[in-house]
C-alpha cells in the first residue's frame, strides 16, 4: 500500500483545480445574474416605449380618420 501522504500530495493539484473551477463557476453565475437583471430592466423599458409609440400611432390614426370623415361629409 502506498503512503497516505503520497496519495494526498498526488491528488492535491486535482483538488486545487476543482476548487478553482468551482470559484470560477460561482463568479460566472454572479455575472450572469447581473446581466439577467440588466436585460430585465431593458425589456421593461422597451415594452413601455412600445406602448407609448402604439398609443401615439393610434391617436394620430384617429385624428387622420376624423379629418377624412369630416372632409367627406362636407
Image (cartoon, grey):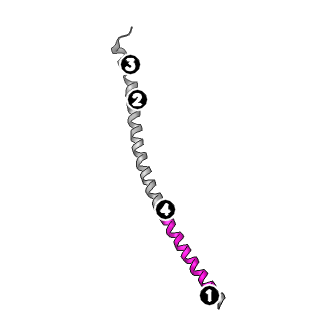
In this rendering, is residue 27 above or below 2? below
- 10 Å crowding of disc 2: few (<14), some (14-19), many (20+): few
Q: What separation in Å lies between label 3 and label 1 (alpha carbons)?
A: 91 Å
Per the image, the residue denoted by label 3 is 10
Circle nearer the N terminus (4, 2): 2
Determine whether, in the image, residue 6 is placed left or right of residue 43.
left
**Quadrant that contains the C terminus:** bottom right
**Residue lying at the far bottom of the rendered structure:** 74
Per the image, the residue denoted by label 1 is 70
Circle nearer the N terminus (4, 3): 3
**Residue lying at the far right of the rendered structure:** 72
Look at 38% across and 36% down and name the residue there: 23
Splitting the image into 4 quarters, where does residue 41 fall? bottom left
Q: What separation in Å lies between label 4 and label 3 (alpha carbons)?
A: 55 Å
Under tag 1, what secondary structure? helix
In this rendering, is residue 60 above or below 22? below
Circle nearer the N terminus (3, 2): 3
Query: Nearer the observer, disc 1 or disc 4?
Result: 1
Q: What separation in Å lies between label 3 and label 2 (alpha carbons)?
A: 14 Å
Splitting the image into 4 quarters, where does residue 25 fall? top left
Circle nearer the N terminus (3, 1): 3
Label disc, if present, on residue 46 of the rendered structure:
4
In this rendering, is residue 21 above or below 64? above
Under tag 2, what secondary structure? helix
Circle nearer the N terminus (1, 4): 4
Residue 64, image x, y percentages: 59, 81
Under tag 3, what secondary structure? helix
Q: Are marks 3 and 2 in contact (CB under 8 Å)?
A: no
* Magenta-colored span: 48-70
Per the image, the residue denoted by label 2 is 18
Query: Nearer the observer, disc 3 or disc 2?
Result: 2
Query: Nearer the observer, disc 3 or disc 1?
Result: 1
Amino acid at each position: 500500500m502506498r503512503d497516505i501522504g503520497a496519495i494526498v500530495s498526488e491528488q492535491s493539484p486535482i483538488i486545487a483545480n476543482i476548487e478553482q473551477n468551482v470559484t470560477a463557476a460561482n463568479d460566472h453565475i454572479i455575472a450572469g445574474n447581473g446581466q439577467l437583471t440588466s436585460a430585465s430592466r431593458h425589456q421593461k423599458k422597451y415594452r413601455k416605449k412600445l406602448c407609448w409609440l402604439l398609443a401615439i400611432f393610434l391617436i394620430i390614426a384617429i385624428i387622420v380618420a376624423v379629418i377624412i370623415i369630416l372632409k367627406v361629409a362636407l
